[in-house]
Image (cartoon, grey):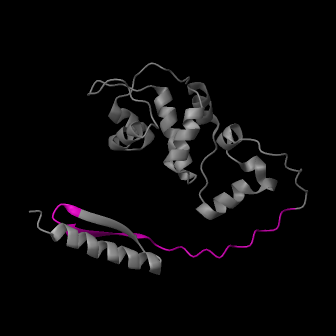
Amino acid sequence: MSPTREPRYSLTELADLANVTPRTIRYYITQGLLRSPGSAGPGVKYDDTDFARLRLIKRLQSEHQPLAEIRTRLDALGDEAILQLDDSTPEPPRDSALAYIRRITDPSRAAERPALYMQTAPVESAVPAPSMAPAPPAPAPDVRLERAQWERIDLAPDVELHIRRPLVRSTAKRVDRLIAIARDLLEEDPT
């Protein structure tokens, strides 16, 4: 079946085909990942290019790409390239993010990189040809993941401060001082 540019999918049909929600499609439009169909309402239709863009967005997300990077990559591609990549991009990896990053950055495994990286990645310098011997596994880095958590602090009615914790001790002291000063200022009688 050859792709068509004739608008033929409603929002819910496109969402069902791409296995996303209509709300996700609307969000992608506001973020500049998908083009706006031009009009609004129940009669809006989408074409195969929109479907291919959606599939490509999902694949890049499964490769742990942030939305800003995905938008940059899609902006650099034309509709024909997006349709072509939709047909040729391999299935996304099913391993961890760390293992995937190691695999795509290993020069001896360049042939395994997805087509999108090979097409849009800038060439910085010549890389010597890899040896025929398999590369030794990279040592596992000492990664200590810290969970960040947002804390909401009410300073006064209709005024709140959001802080991502944990903070460095010196910063935490300054933030505590800021909270005290803000509460004092907001409690003052304006008259």
Q: Number of labelled discs?
A: 0
Q: Residue at x 40, y 44 (%)?
A: 20
Taking the spot 40% from the left edge, 23% from the top edge, the residue there is 8
Based on the picture, tell me whether residue 157 belongs to the magenta stretch.
yes
Q: Is 152 covered by the magenta stretch?
A: yes
Determine the residue positioned at 52% across, 40% down.
Answer: 71
Relative side of 44 to 157, left or right? right
Residue drawn at 49 percent across, 47 percent down: 67
Q: Main secondary structure of the magenta part?
A: loop
**Which image quadrant: the N terminus?**
top right
**Res. 59 in view:** no
Residue 125 in view in this figure: yes
Say left or right for 161 vs 184: right
Please indicate whether residue 128 sits to the left or right of residue 116 in the image: right
Outermost residue toward the left in this view: 191
Q: Which residues are magenta?
A: 134-159
Residue 81's spot in the image, x, y percent? 62, 29
Give the farthest residue toward the top: 6
Viewer-nearest residue: 50 or 4: 50
Left or right: where 165 falls relative to 157: right
- Residue 183 position, x and y percent, is 22, 72
